[in-house]
Amino acid sequence: MKFKIAAGVLSLLGLFVCAAPALAHHAFTAEYDGTKKITLTGILTKVDWINPHVFLYVDVKDSSGKVTNWAFETGPTVALHRYGAKRSMFVEGQTITIEAYPAKDGTKAPAGLRHIKFQDGTEFNYNNPDAPPDPPK
């Protein structure tokens, strides 16, 4: 009888431990301001094509000539594939224009990716399912 109780308690404890990472995932609205959009043009310096989120790093030059490295977060690789993106599209050193949702805390990293226009004119839309819908026009 004691063995069955101990096994039951350990099983429940195991469930809680396994569920903790799922609860730790952040919500879009906790990190990004879905009511604002920013558009920046710069040089793609690094691509972290990994799960659980792909990050794109872009050097953006402001009007005074100062360069700031921005980080843009997307969903997982499988989500980008679903929307038609391939890793080979993201060539470091190319100039890209990105539309994104800014971080709520005003930092330059990360911003939530929405749209990219590549140097060759190719465009990619990432419709983050957690982002608020665009207001009607």
Image (cartoon, grey):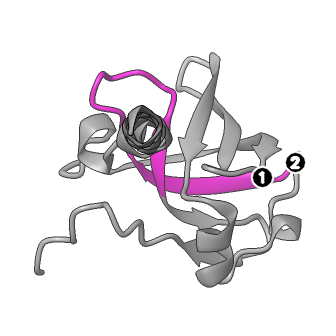
Q: Nearer the viewer, residue 131 or 136?
A: 131
Q: Amino acid at mark 1?
A: Trp
State whether residue 6 is above or below residue 121: above
Q: In the image, residue 98 lies at what x, y percent?
A: 55, 54
Q: In the image, residue 117 lies at what x, y percent?
A: 63, 67
Q: In the image, residue 97 lies at what x, y percent?
A: 60, 55
* Neighbour tally class for label 2: few under 14, some 14-19, many 20 plus, Cα within 10 Å: some
Mark closer to the chain start, 2 or 1: 1
Disc number placed over residue 49 in the picture, else none: 1
- Magenta-span inclusion, residue 110: yes
> Residue at position x 43%, y 45% from top?
15
Q: Give how far apart the Cα atoms at labels 2 and 1 are.
A: 12 Å
> Residue at position x 53%, y 26% from top?
63
> Residue at position x 42%, y 72% from top?
127
Q: Amino acid at mark 2?
A: Glu
Residue at mark 2: 92
